[in-house]
């Protein structure tokens, strides 16, 4: 077997703001982010309060929501990275849900990069 390592054609940042105020159980981005081509999404995220993180993906008109980090809560002030295969025109949004019944919002640091090969 021959393995070939390729450099990406380009890397694009999909979100403009990195520090976002999130309400528990609601979408983080005011509008879904759309992938410009086939490739890989690199999601870097840190939250000020612990909670679970879900990704909502709409692809070819079908929407699915699934947990990141195997459904385990993200620890506060810890950086996480998630890589997701992306289809052309796929739309994504993230949903943070508080681990505490008394905490209803958090500051989310997030960068979504798209890498096209």
Image: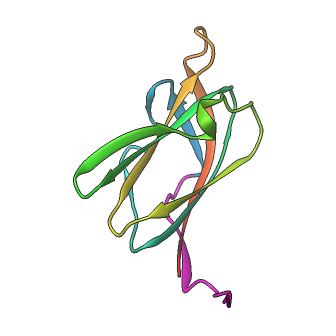
Look at the magenta stretch and give its main secondary structure.
loop
The stretch drawn in magenta includes residue 5 = yes
> Left of 38 or right of it: where is 17?
right
Where does the magenta region start and end?
1-17
**Residue plotted at (42% across, 73% down):** 38
> Left of 31 or right of it: where is 55?
right
Point out the residue furthest to the front here: 1
**Residue plotted at (39% across, 43% down):** 30
> Left of 61 or right of it: where is 97?
right
For the N terminus, the image quarter is bottom right
**Residue plotted at (46% across, 25% down):** 25
Residue 78, picture quadrant? top right
Above or below, 59 against 80 in this view is below
**Residue plotted at (30% across, 45% down):** 63
Task: Indicate the position of residue 107 as horizontal and vertical percent values.
Answer: 62, 34
User: Which one is nearer the viewer's eye here, 74 or 62?
Assistant: 62
Above or below, 64 against 16 in this view is above
User: Which one is nearer the viewer's eye here, 107 or 93?
Assistant: 93
Point out the residue furthest to the top here: 102
Number of marks in the image? 0
Task: Indicate the position of residue 3 as horizontal and vertical percent values.
Answer: 68, 87
Above or below, 47 against 89 in this view is above
The stretch drawn in magenta includes residue 10 = yes
Task: Indicate the position of residue 47 as horizontal and vertical percent values.
Answer: 67, 35
């Amino acid at each position: 077997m021959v393995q070939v390592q390729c450099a990406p054609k380009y890397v694009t940042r999909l979100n403009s703001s990195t520090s976002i105020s999130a309400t528990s159980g609601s979408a983080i981005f005011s509008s879904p982010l759309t992938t410009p081509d086939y490739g890989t999404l690199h999601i870097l995220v840190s939250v000020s309060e612990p909670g679970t993180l879900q990704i909502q993906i709409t692809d070819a008109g079908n929407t699915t929501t699934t947990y990141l980090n195997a459904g385990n809560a993200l620890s506060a002030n810890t950086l996480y990275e998630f890589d997701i295969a992306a289809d052309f025109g796929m739309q994504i949004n993230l949903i943070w849900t508080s681990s505490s019944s008394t905490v209803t919002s958090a500051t989310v640091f997030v960068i979504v990069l798209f890498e096209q090969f």
